Amino acid sequence: MKRIIVLTGAGISAESGLKTFRDGDGLWNTYRMEDLATPEAWNSNPELVLEFYNWRRKQLYEAEPNPAHIVLAKLEQHFDVQIITQNVDDLHERAGSTKVLHLHGELKKVRSTVDPDLVYELRGWELKLGDLCEKGSQLRPHVVWFGEEVPNIMIANSMVRNADIFIVIGTSLKVYPAAGLLYYVSANVPKYLVDPKAGPEMVIKNLKIIREKASAGVHVLVDELIKNL
């Protein structure tokens, strides 16, 4: 069974109604990324950071997987599929995908501020000041903030090296280190990029670009992959 590695970004979740920081509305448009998603922001105003992530978490609880998530999950009937996602939502899992590696953390989980190995499932969408881990320290969102290391990137690098087919969906390939994964894929491996905004500058061997939104583009791609089995 061929091994497909899929890298997904914000574009696949946008069709489920999940807004990113940059296209959020109301209050959050008045803040910079440095005010909400950095270790410095947490140290200076943890209450504001928690409020921002509570908003994002509440939004996630109201969202559902879209056809792109569901079709990717069904692809497991024909291929060994490993998803590497930059997204912190759980829509891939809820759609039925069984192998999902989160590069930037998971929104529904929280962790200790003194021991990063202490990770917990959060019940509900709200995390508050005073919510403590078993060692008595404040819990924080289990996400990778700007300026922090990406612990799972080495695992992802190893995965893409062993890909028989590599697919990128809904990401601009401008956020590193995730964007660098493409360059770990063997030159002779078929590569697909599903993104309506993909530019002509993407000159990479064996790369096919599908300039569609995730739901439409993934359907086209999966039909092609199954037909070529």
Image (cartoon, rainbow, N blue to C red):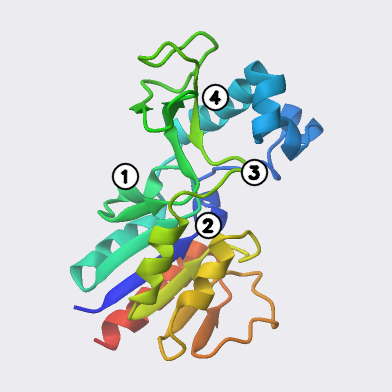
The amino acid type, in three-letter code, at marker 2 is Gly
| Helix, strand or loop for disc 3 | loop
The residue to which callout 2 is attached is: 9
Residue at 51 percent across and 50 percent down: it is 150
Q: CA distance from mark 2 to mark 1?
A: 16 Å
Q: Is residue 68 visible?
A: no
Q: Residues within 10 Å of mark 1 (few under 14, many from 20)?
A: some
Q: Position of residue 104 (x, y in %)?
A: 50, 46
> Who comes first in sequence, dot 3 or dot 1?
1
Would you place residue 198 above or below residue 229 in this image?
above
Q: CA distance from mark 4 to mark 2?
A: 21 Å
| Helix, strand or loop for disc 1 | helix
Q: CA distance from mark 3 to mark 4?
A: 18 Å
Residue at 51 percent across and 74 percent down: it is 182
The amino acid type, in three-letter code, at marker 4 is Asn
The image quarter in which residue 203 lies: bottom right
Identity of the residue furthest to the right in this view: 30
The amino acid type, in three-letter code, at marker 1 is Arg
Residue in front for this viewpoint, 110 or 98: 110
Q: Would residue 119 appear left or right of 60 to someone viewing this image? A: left
The residue to which callout 1 is attached is: 94
The residue to which callout 3 is attached is: 146
The reply to whether callout 4 and callout 1 are in contact (CB within 8 Å) is: no
